[in-house]
Image (cartoon, rainbow, N blue to C red):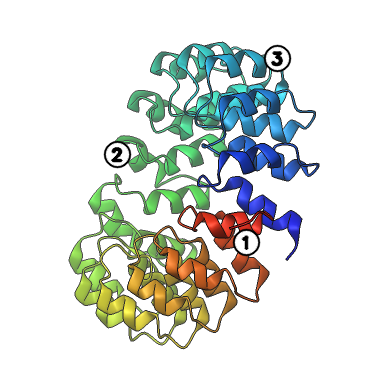
Amino acid sequence: MAKAKINLSIAKNPSTPVEILKLLAKEKDEGVRSDVASNPSTPLEILKNLAKDGSEDVIYSVAMNPNVSDDLIKILMGEEYGKRGLAENPRTNTATLDKLAKDESHKIRNLVANNPSTRIETLIELSKDESDWVRSGVASNPCTPEDILIKLASEKDEDRIRAYVAQNESAPTAALDLLIKDPEESTREYTARHPNLSVSLIAECTAKKGKDASLKEYSALNPSLPTELILTLSKDKNSSVRASIASNPSTPLEILETLLKDKDEDVRRNICQNPNANEVLFNALAKDKEDSVRWFLAMNKELASSILETLSKDGSARVRQSVASHPNSSPEILEALSKDKDESIRDGVASNPNTPIGIINEYAGLKK
C-alpha cells in the first residue's frame, strides 16, 4: 500500500482519532498537512500551528476549516492565502468579510462577493466594484438582492456577468426572461434550464430547432417543465433530450420506468441520480450491463445499504471505489473493501467516516 496516498485519505477523515491527526500534522508531505488542516475534527491547537506553516496550501486549508476561530483569523489575516481562504469560507464572521471586501486584491474581493455569508449591504457595494470579476461574484451569490441581479443581467458589455446571473439559483423571472434572448448561446442554455424562467418561455425552448436546438436539450432539464411536455420529450428521437428528461427532478416515476428500458446508456445512467427513482429501479440499475451506469448509481448519496452491498462486489473497480467512499456504506461493507486488491478502493475506505477505527489504526501503522 502506498503509504503517502493512504495518509492523505486518513488525514481528511473526520473520524480519524486526534492522536493520529497530531502525527499527520507533522508529515513532510504538504498534501497530508493540508488535509489535516481542513479536517473539521482537527483541534484548535494543531490548527494554530498549521496556520504558521510554510506552505500556502496548508495555510489556505486552515482558513477554509469550518471551525475557524477568532484566534486563527488574527494569524491568517497576515497571509495572502489565509485571506483567500477566509474570504471563501462561509463560516468566516461578517466583520472579517467586510474588511476583506475592501482588500486591494480583486481576487479576494471576488471570493467575498461569492460568499453566501457576506452581508447584503456589502454585496450591494461590491456590485459597483470596478472589477468585472468582483461583480461576477455578486452575480453568482444566491443572497444577492433581486434588483441587483436584474441590473447585472442588463450589463451589455459583460458576457461573463450575465452568464453568472443565469446560473444563480435565486435569479428572478424578470432577469431570466431577459437573458433567454442573450446573444451568448451558453447564457441562453443556462437560462433555459432555470426553474424561475417563465413557463411559457420554457415551452418555447422545447420547440427550438436549428442554431437554437440546444435549448431543447437544456429546457428538458428544467424542473418547472409541465408534465405533458416531460412526457413528450421522453419520447424524443434525440437521446440527449431523453437523457435530460431522465435527469429532471420533476419527471414522474412512471416515465422513469419507461426510460429504464432505453437503449442509450446515458439515459439509463441519468436515472441513477433522479430523486423520484425508487428501490425497484435502483435494483434494476445495479444489474445494468454497462459499468458506467452502475458507477453513477453507486455515487447516489441516497442509496440504501442493501444496494451498496450488491455494488460492493461489482467487477468494476470504479464502482467499488464509489461504494468505499459512500456515506451510507456500513462498517461491514467497508471492512470487506478494506482488503480489496485495488489501492483506490482502500483509499476510499480510509477516508470514509464510517470505517471502523481499528482499520484506520491499521492503515496508519498502529495496532488495532
Mark 1 residue type: Asp
Q: Earlier in the sequence, mark 1 or mark 2?
A: 2
Question: Up-down: is 38 above or below 341?
Answer: above
Residue at the spot of label 2: 173
Mark 2 residue type: Thr
Front label number (1 vs 3): 1
Residue closest to the eye, 52 or 272: 52
Q: Helix, strand or loop at disc 1?
A: helix
Q: Are marks 1 and 3 in contact (CB under 8 Å)?
A: no
Q: Which mark is residue 78?
A: 3
Horizontal and vertical percent for residue 182?
Answer: 46, 44
Q: Earlier in the sequence, mark 2 or mark 3?
A: 3
Horizontal and vertical percent for residue 351?
Answer: 56, 54
Q: Earlier in the sequence, mark 1 or mark 3?
A: 3
Residue closest to the eye, 209 or 7: 7
Mark 3 residue type: Gly
Q: Which mark is residue 347?
A: 1
Report the Cα–Cα distance between label 1 and label 3: 35 Å
Identify the image quadrant of residue 237.
bottom left
Identify the image quadrant of residue 298.
bottom left
Q: Which mark is residue 67?
A: none
Report the Cα–Cα distance between label 1 and label 2: 45 Å
